[in-house]
Amino acid sequence: MISDSQIFIVVDIEADGPAVGLNSMLSLAAVATTEKEEVSRFYQKLTTLPDASADPNVTEWWKEHQEAWKEAITDPQPPERVMSEFYNWVTELEREAIFVSNPISLDYTFVSWYLSRFAPANPFKNEKNSIRTLDIKSYVAGKFGFTFDNSRRIHWPKELTKDMPEHTHNALDDAIGYAVVLRKLVAMSEKLTTL
């Protein structure tokens, strides 16, 4: 599925709302993985944006996940520092990075905005400014013939989730879990007859 010059970066973020800029990213985790094995991990918490505020509905949701909330806001670092470190971590892998997440619409929107504002560049774009992303939810829908609405994590088959760590809303735990699922999806796809 990917060449030897490429690597998957499975990302999970936690935020205090759904709209980047209006709301803030609280934590950023990533797992660098090949099709077969994990290579490296990244995990940092970020201070909130000065002109942003928490979304009231998301604040209510966080009240139901107190342990994850406490983890997401403990020892935050300035976004400039975190995003520069993240950029360096990705580029030091010395492979073409492919951004992978579930859902891509939330995670990539936040990460790309923060990279654009606080890092030297976006390492998930190629020289033609094309973005390299993979949405796990869409991959699952295509692989198993699910409708898009039924391709949420709670509907995934046990063969995908068997070794997946519990989904805790700790960004690192969840990125690790999605990396496990991605490797399983790739292994299943490799068993298909090539055209």
Image (cartoon, rainbow, N blue to C red):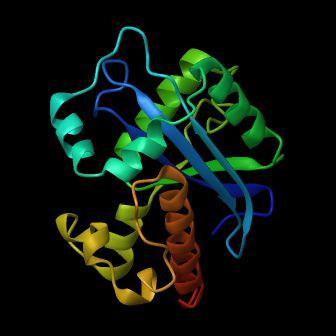
> Is 189 situated above or below 65?
below
Q: Quadrant of residue 16?
A: top left
Vertical placement of 195 versus 27: above or below? below
Rendered location of residue 108, percent (x, y): 46, 40
Location of residue 187 (image quadrant): bottom right
Q: Is residue 190 above or below residue 82?
A: below
What is the x, y in percent for residue 122? 63, 29
Relative placement, left or right, of 110 versus 155 is right
Q: Does 30 appear above or below 48? A: below
Residue at x 34%, y 15% (from the top left corner): 52
Q: Residue at x 63, y 18 (%)?
A: 80
| Residue 52 relative to residue 118: left or right | left
Which percent across, then down, holds residue 55?
22, 28
Q: Nearer the viewer, residue 194 or 110?
A: 110
Q: Quadrant location of the N terminus?
A: bottom right
**Left or right of 89 in this view: 124:** left
Total count of labels: 0
Q: Name the residue rendered at 55%, 39% in the picture.
A: 131
Left or right: where does residue 34 sit relative to residue 56?
A: right
Give x and y (percent) for residue 149.
Answer: 18, 64
Please state, as top left, top right, bottom left or bottom right, where the C terminus lies in the image: bottom right
